[in-house]
Amino acid sequence: IATSPFDREVVRSMCGIGKSLGLVVVAERIEYLETLPILTGLGVSLGQGFALHRPEPLDQLLDRISPCPRR
């Protein structure tokens, strides 16, 4: 969406539909950090993708986000 006005308009329209229905808009497959401010400006609330964090095994994720040590 950073280089394509057409793609940006599609995302803007989808965000508008989601927001008009009272939904939280989630963007997937965010691969480049430069798209984050664009997505935020279009109304995206949450996102996932390589630009935010690489895939990892479940045990590593749980260790990273868990407030308590696992047994």
Image: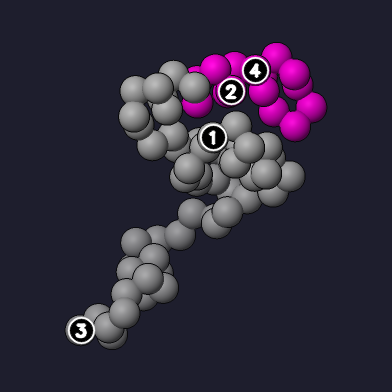
Can residue 32 be seen from the camera position used here? no
Which mark sits nearer the N-terminus, 4 or 1?
4
Quarter in which the C terminus is drawn: bottom left
Q: Residue at x 36, y 75 (%)?
A: 63
The local crowd at label 3, few if under 14, some if 14 to 19, many if 20 or more residues have their Cα within 10 Å, is few
x then y, percent, for residue 55: 49, 54
Q: Distance between the residues labelled 1 and 3?
A: 40 Å
Q: Residue 43 has which mark?
A: 1
Residue 38 drawn in magenta: no
Circles 2 and 4, Cβ within 8 Å, touching? The answer is yes
Circles 1 and 2, Cβ within 8 Å, touching? The answer is yes
Q: Residue at x 64, y 44 (%)?
A: 36
Mark 3 = which residue? 71
x then y, percent, for residue 4: 75, 21
Magenta range: 1-15
In the image, 59: left or right of 38? left
Q: Which amino acid type is shown beneath numbered disc 2?
A: Arg
Mark 2 = which residue? 12
